[in-house]
Image (spheres, grey):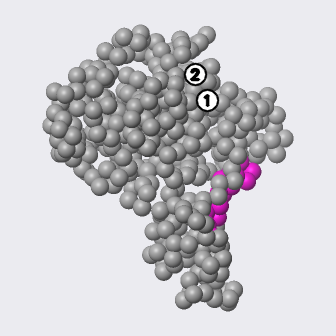
Amino acid sequence: MERYYQPEIECASRETILAWQNERLCKQVKNVWDNVPYYRRKMEEKGLTPDDIRGVEDLHKLPFVTKDDLREAYPYGLVARPLRDCVRIQSTSGTTGKRVVAFYTQHDLDLWEDCCARAIVAAGGTHEDVCQVSYGYGLFTGGPGLNGGSHKVGCLTIPTSSGNTERQIMFIRDLNATILCCTPSYAAYLGETMKEMGLSPDEIPLKAGIFGAEAWSEEMRRSIQETLGIKAYDIYGLTELSGPGVAFECSEQSGMHINEDHFIAEIIDPQTGEVLPEGSQGELVFTSITKEAFPLLRYRTRDICVLSRKSCSCGRTHVKMSKPRGRSDDMLIIKGVNVFPSQIETVLLAQGYQANYQMIVDRVNNTDTLEVQVEMTPENFSDNLAQITQMEKSLVAALKAMLGIYAKVRLVAPKSIARSEGKAVRVIDKRKI
């Protein structure tokens, strides 16, 4: 029997959802026009005023917002409320080390937590459950979002954050955790570790998992479900829009319902920006229609997917998005962290290297690995092993400071990385996703 956190919203008729979207979109456009000079300029450049937007059918007229806009407007240029009304920021890494900083009013936090609560209930969660949140806390949205959602549902919440696997397993077993929230690769790692400890799925109290923040395959889902004896649900979100809970899977596990009372989704052709008909594969674009502090209109996510309005056996009426099938830019998600080749270049140039490098991404024992091979320049070339080790160490530290994750560095001789005609092959991703 399917349960809902807010049945009157999650199962609302299409007409009702559209009416909410029309009204909230017009209000949001007026809000940004009045309170965000950056937006007003973008609209004026297109010859638009709020009167030109009467509902969802006019959405395509509005300009897109991209990561470049976030970088240009950093830190306060897109904030629509006085800072005294904002109670929190969350943040994610941007393309060149300038972080994306998103602002929240208390109302924004409440709505975000509602979205995460819907995801937990869709995964079978009730106030009887013990929910272990093993996403990172702090600036990353994973921990705080699911933590708040778990409280709203009334679960006993274990805020373990990420890492310290022995302690994670101890709490799962001693406190009888029934729902696990973390990245899929960490869930797989926990499962493998428990298997090595001789625990069978029947001896693990977990019944469901809510896994997101990185790409994962159906094979990986099956493997996690078997090892942990659970049902594994996907969740999707972006810091720019709030965080996890923009969309979530239901018991059907065939795509994620987008919370359309808060977000309007479009699919566009990444090259032309043209809106594509339903069922087409293209780039996902979101408009946040209820955010107060940091409302983004037509934000280009760079995620490639398909939207479907086929009716769902779970009874929810909100549109479904497929798992992202790749990206229209060069961003990689490694260990749940956004990594751009341009960030690596920034570090190399600052350290006196040229931008001749290759990133090799792999997944070993269900954990992402990153190795960066860097060509030495003729000036800093050396065959002194101690010196090379020292140079590699200082690059490892600089990359860790920029990316927030460990990358192995291997210095190689000048001109030893293959040059290709046209675009250099910067990234070799060996993960089977």
Q: In this view, does 376 lie to the left or right of 114?
A: right
Q: Do the numbered discs 2 and 1 sit on residues whose CB atoms are within 8 Å?
A: yes
In the image, residue 404 above or below residue 269 = below
Report the magenta stretch's main SS: strand
Q: How crowded is mark 1: few (under 14 residues within 10 Å), some or many (20 or more)?
A: many
Q: Name the residue under label 2.
A: 250
The extreme front residue here reads: 421
The extreme right residue here reads: 198
Camera sees residue 40: no
Residue 233 is tagged as 1
Camera sees residue 255: yes
In the image, residue 72 above or below residue 301 = below
SS label for mark 1 = strand
Q: Is residue 82 left or right of residue 429?
A: left
Residue 196 lies in the magenta stretch: no
Going by the numbered disc 1, the residue's amino acid type is Tyr
Residue 371 is tagged as none
Residue range (magenta): 358-373
